[in-house]
Amino acid sequence: MDNIAIFGGTFNPIHLGHLILAQEVQQSLNLRKIIFMPSGNPPHKDFNDMVTSEHRFNMVKLAIDGNKYFEISDIEVNRFGKSYTYDTLIQLKNIYDFKNIKFIVGFDALKDMVTWKNIKEVFKLADFVVVNRGGLENHFEEIIQENSILSLGNFEMIKIPSIEISSTMIRRRIAEKKSIKYLVPDNVIDYIYDHGLYRGEFSEGI
Ligand SMILES: Nc1ncnc2c1ncn2[C@@H]1O[C@H](COP(=O)(O)OP(=O)(O)OP(=O)(O)O)[C@@H](O)[C@H]1O
Ligand SMILES: O=C(O)c1ccc[n+]([C@@H]2O[C@H](COP(=O)([O-])O)[C@@H](O)[C@H]2O)c1
């Protein structure tokens, strides 16, 4: 697993913010591969307009098509129960026997990490690559001070162009019948409309 990073997410749906992030991290760290890891059953997300893991997986697969640095893993979508990162890292370690692996997150995910399953063990298994999001990166020191367990983590910051796109924004726009062109890859837009996704009631992610 040398020079490889895992990029976990709900991807409900995948958008250009995710792809630009992955592209920037791959180039900055000269990574051999980024493995997109769609959550089967996201631990901390609960909203009405979550589509099946099969749809989310298929959309990620379409979005990364043709990029030799990007791959997708189905281990979380194929695992029963909540998709905890700790379980994923143990599963990967049993297969690939690495010491540490890189795991990419946006800055908004950082302070929530205190609530992750077995976070102390997670910090022993993974080094985190953190990208800026929504200006939260300016509060790094405060976040660490307020959540002392985070001081056990190994974080590497990568500055990417700020892209204010979220899956919530995409779901809201579809529900409001607004265009999502230039926010989501064209083949993913076709998939969303062909399968009638996100047309129901919009709900804010929590
Ligand atoms: N525009 C973005 N800029 C930087 N990081 C991002 C961006 N969008 C998503 N991420 C990061 O990608 C990972 C997966 O994100 P996720 O699939 O939850 O998308 P999201 O846009 O945050 O979704 P939602 O709006 O439904 O909460 C998280 O670590 C998140 O912080
Ligand atoms: O393991 C946990 O307890 C845990 C709790 C929340 C999020 N995560 C992981 O963090 C990554 C980003 O999460 P999200 O909710 O922004 O899609 C994704 O891989 C999730 O599985 C992991």
Image (cartoon, rainbow, N blue to C red):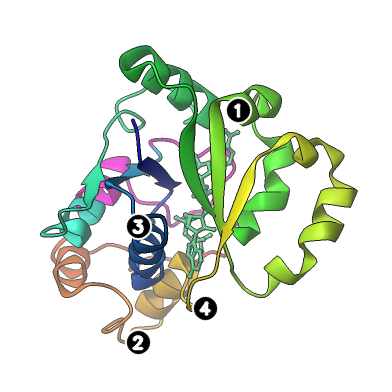
At 38% from the left and 16% from the top, the residue drawn is 97
In this picture, is 62 found above or below 187?
above
Eye-nearest disc, 4 or 3: 3
Look at the image and tell me in which quarter the N terminus lies. top left
Q: Earlier in the sequence, mark 1 or mark 2?
A: 1
- The residue wearing badge 1 is 122
Label disc, if present, on residue 161 of the rendered structure: none
Could you tell which of marks 1 and 4 lies nearer the N-terminus? 1
Q: Nearer the viewer, mark 3 or mark 1?
A: 3
The label on residue 162 is: 4
Which amino acid does the dot numbered 4 rest on? Ser
The numbered mark, 3 or 1, whose residue comes first in the sequence reads 3
Taking the image as shown, residue 94 lies to the left or right of residue 134, namely left
Confirm if mark 4 falls within 8 A of ligand 1.
yes
Circle 1: element type: helix
| Residue at mark 3 to residue at mark 1: CA–CA distance | 22 Å
Spatial CA distance of label 2 from label 4 is 22 Å
C-alpha distance separating marks 4 and 3: 16 Å
Residue at (29, 73) in percent of width and height:
184
Q: Secondary structure at mark 4?
A: loop
- Mark closest to the chain's N terminus, 2 or 4: 4
| 186 or 71: nearer the viewer | 71
Mark found first going from the N terminus, 4 or 3 = 3
| Mark identifier at residue 178 | 2
Task: Point out the stretch of residues depicted in magenta.
Answer: 40-58
Q: Which residue is mark 3?
A: 26
Q: Principal SS element in the magenta part?
A: loop
The Cα atoms of the two marked residues, 3 and 2, are separated by 32 Å
Question: For disc 1, does the CB lie below 8 Å from ligand 2?
Answer: yes
Q: Dot 2 surroundings within 10 Å: few (below 14), some, or many (20 or more)?
A: few
As shown in the figure, which amino acid type bears the numbered disc 2?
A: Lys
